[in-house]
Image (cartoon, rainbow, N blue to C red):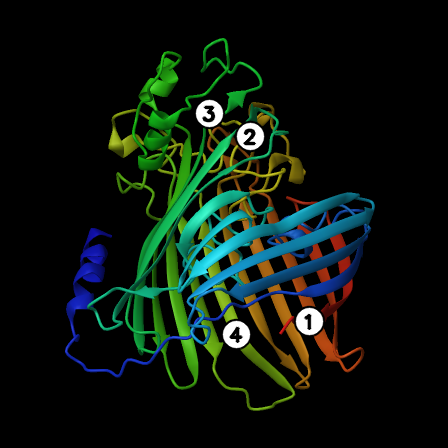
Amino acid sequence: MRFLLSILLTLPFVGFSQSETKEPVIYTDSTTNYVEFVGMGSTNGYTPFWIQSNQYGIVPKTGPNLSARAGLERYWTISENKTRNNLRVGVGVEAVGNFVQTKNFLLPQAHATLRYKNWEFYVGRKKQALGLADSTIGSGSYAWSGNALPIPKIYLGTTRFVPVPFTKGWLSFQAFYSDGLFENNRPITENLKFHQKAFYMRIGKPHSTLKLYGGFNHQVQWGGKLKKNLGLTNDNLNMPSGFKNYINAVIGAIGGSGDDITYFDSTSRIGNHLGSIDVAMEIETYESSIFLYKQFIYEDGSLFYMTGLKDGLYGARIKRKHSYGANFEVNAAVLEFLYTKDQGGNDFVLGDGRKRGHDNYFNNQQVRDGWGYYDRTIGTPFIPPTSQTKWRWPNYADNFTSNNRVMMFHLGMEGTLFRKIQWMGKFSYSENSGAWLQEFKGSPKQFSGMLMMQSKLDVLGGLTVKGAYAADIGDLYRKTYGFMLGVRKDFSFY
């Protein structure tokens, strides 16, 4: 891995002698404006995995349900040079109302945004894709998959890969820095704070035949207060907070500061840290684009000692660039393999890098309600909350998940049918082994699949009608067959 990083750092300085014509950049902002009505049902009152997963937390886990959704987003140019749109201000809101079995009102997006060229600053909730992986038909990035409601935060970052000066476009970066807050009705913690940042680099121009990518994302749950004494804090149940401990959380330093710091806080990193180090390669041909990626997991030090290298998300995606008008076409396909069973091994000895195991992904000894938001996994949905599966273990009664040792194969595809119907399929098979401290007997197997189709009708200026059929078959979840039907109207302010 260190050898690969050295290659990533040296390659950008090869081939910068080419001359190129610099054209003025016109900055644009894509918006989402729609009204949608959706109905869904199933054979047993539970929504199938692939109908409700990676939907930013808006689809209920139980049914039947009716859902009304609407989104409005708008950007205005406020710079002097109106043609280039350098400086823009925007607002957006997306509202979802669920009825029948589950009754709630959600705001998956509500933000105020200021953009300058390829940079943006926003406050609020906004949907976000993170990590080097396919975000459309894939299974979702390991640490941040779009499976839960977006966390409200203050965010500063880039909107795309931005060229590094003096490299003539051969080297570019994408990065952000943000802080936010978790919900207060968590089982174990309250007033829990959130820190997140990421940095990625690309070697190669946007249309280069070969492009190399590398970077990391870093998430921290920190501060706040415990609702009950876990034997780790003082009687006031407060976890380390304040500016000095915020800096410790940001840089991942061991040990906190303050009068109320316990032995646990002084010998551990402040907060619950997790993320991934990602590498990828993209090959462009006339016919297609091929994207290969690997997300290395880090959470409790095993990756630093090179003992958890086999864990992570492996992926390969191929996209066709041209359509030939056939009655049946596959335009993109993704094959992924998720492996989280190693975790550095079954032994944990502090100070011994060879036995720095029990990483216990998405669980934490202090933040017991773990890597979740409103009882949904923030990361890959294949490490589910204990409440979502049929399996219960007393040792994990107050932990977020009882199943973080998983091996999963995923196939995603999308294309067209009869040139007018868009279709998408997601098919996943997993082997689930529980956790190192409490393994599942027999490693229950699970298949979850979904086939979705949609088409535009020349009604009311263009309506999109869509439907999906999905199934869960196996031993981890309840056997379920379900459907979704919806109608959507997209529109623009321009």
Query: How many other residues sit within 10 Å of disc 3, few (<14), some (14-19) or many (≥20)?
Result: few
- Marks 2/1: CA–CA distance: 40 Å
User: Which residue was labeled with disc 4?
Assistant: 332
- Marks 1/4: CA–CA distance: 26 Å
> Which quarter shows the C terminus?
bottom right
Q: In the visual, does 69 lie left or right of 389?
A: right
Q: Are marks 1 and 4 in contact (CB under 8 Å)?
A: no
User: Which residue was labeled with disc 2?
Assistant: 369
- Marks 2/4: CA–CA distance: 37 Å
Q: Are marks 2 and 4 in contact (CB under 8 Å)?
A: no
User: Which residue was labeled with disc 3?
Assistant: 365
Q: Nearer the viewer, residue 147 or 108?
A: 108
**Residue at far front of view:** 80
Mark before the other along the chain sequence, 2 or 1: 2
Q: Are marks 2 and 1 in contact (CB under 8 Å)?
A: no
The amino acid sitting under disc 2 is Asp
Residue 131, given in percent of the width and then of the height, sits at 42, 55
The amino acid sitting under disc 3 is Gln
Q: In the visual, does 315 lie left or right of 446?
A: left
Mark before the other along the chain sequence, 3 or 4: 4
Q: Secondary structure at mark 4?
A: strand
Residue 298, given in percent of the width and then of the height, sits at 36, 42
Q: Are marks 3 and 1 in contact (CB under 8 Å)?
A: no
Q: Are marks 3 and 4 in contact (CB under 8 Å)?
A: no
Residue drawn at x 30%, y 26% as measured from the top left: 254
